[in-house]
Amino acid sequence: MKPVILTGDRPTGPLHLGHFVGSLQNRVKLQNDYKQFVIIADYQALTDNYDNPSLVRNNVEQVMLDYLATGLDPALNTFFIQSQVPELYELTCYFLNLVTVARLERNPTIKDEIRQKNMKDSIPTGFFCYPISQAADILAFKADLVPVGEDQSPMIEQTNEIAKRFNFLYKAETLKEVKSLIGTVGRLPGIDGKAKMSKSLGNAIYLGDSADDIRKKVNLMYTDPNHLKVSDPGTVEGNVVFSFLDVFDANQTEVEELKAHYRRGGLGDGVLKKRLVEILEALIAPMRQRREQYQKDPAFVKDLLRNGTNNARQVAATTLLEVRSAMGIVY
Ligand code: TRP
């Protein structure tokens, strides 16, 4: 039997290059060696979009298309919709008692989000508890590995605490601790040079972008504001074009040479940007093609999600039987 991966995303918008280097790339790489479950976390997306459920609803198929576009193979992956697996809600409820409010308050991801979203004294309970629901997602599938972006490590830590606590309290070996797999790049900056690429910051390059979008965005990239003339010496650190070349350019020896040249002076931003446009276009063009292929067959995509969700329900239901039995909640 293959080891299990459980991974996924919130359907709040199209996926971008940050998602790609953070986890999608790993998922594609590992899909042959693991039984991979991919969760479209619509319930979790609702915890901070409850005032706009249609945004979440409308992005489910879009994220699904992004998955297929990236090269996740329908024959190798089980794609499912979180809200349609009620067993996950049930497991979340049992877990709610195993985590203290103080522990949730210390979760760095939650802390950051509360600050960013300016929630202060009006934190929705559902939002506050989403790490517990995420633990249920992972533990219900007895996952061995979770490929996620760097910001998700605290969630995995919390998940393992819950697994241990459950097994200890109910003298069981029902739940399995999990490992996270963080992408090669901790965090891809946005095109504006902000620390993180994100839809809400409006600084993302999407996996569905056209060749024209890519060119425009790369041309907008933040470089060295003091590098006015080609002959001026330039700064590499914090220069987004170089950050991207570091990540996406297969020829790192040449990138090092370009950096030295840029620092000396005599190398224009235009040359570097042209190089990056070509690299990104070569990465994204096949995704665009696959997406177009699948877009022609919405019934296939719908069935894929329906069947995947049914399969996921069966797996989660089996775990829930064991969970209830470990707790003695059997009638
Ligand atoms: N929190 C993840 C994100 O923001 C989405 C997610 C929900 C998830 N449940 C998960 C990721 C379980 C990995 C495993 O993208």
Image (spheres, rainbow, N blue to C red):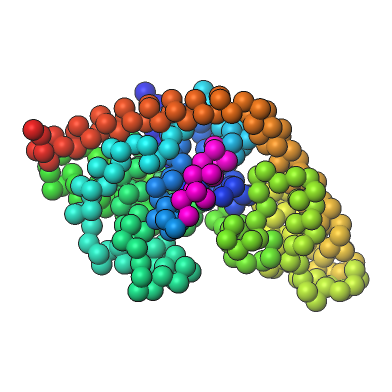
How many numbered marks have been drawn onto this rendered protein structure? 0
Quadrant in which residue 85 is drawn: top left
Q: Look at the image and tell me in which quarter the C terminus lies.
A: top left
User: Residue 277: horizontal and vertical position, in percent?
Assistant: 79, 50
Q: Is residue 258 above or below residue 95?
A: below
Q: Is residue 252 above or below residue 111?
A: above
Residue 288 at least partly seen: yes
Magenta region includes residue 277 = no
User: Residue 206: horizontal and vertical position, in percent?
Assistant: 66, 49
Q: Is residue 118 left or right of residue 101?
A: right
Magenta span: chief secondary structure:
helix
Q: Name which residue lies at 84% across and 69% down.
A: 264
Q: Is residue 195 left or right of residue 37?
A: right
Residue 21 at least partly seen: no
Q: Name which residue lies at 15% across and 47% down.
A: 168
Q: Is residue 213 above or below residue 301?
A: below
Q: Nearer the viewer, residue 331 or 140?
A: 331
Q: Name which residue lies at 53% across and 26% down.
A: 74
Q: Look at the image and tell me in which quarter the N terminus lies.
A: top left
Q: Which residues are magenta?
A: 52-64
Q: Is residue 226 left or right of residue 323?
A: right
Q: Nearer the viewer, residue 269 or 129?
A: 129
Q: Name which residue lies at 46% across and 41% down.
A: 40
Q: Nearer the viewer, residue 150 or 120?
A: 120
User: Residue 100: horizontal and vertical position, in percent?
Assistant: 22, 62
Outermost bottom residue: 226
User: Residue 101: horizontal and vertical position, in percent?
Assistant: 25, 64
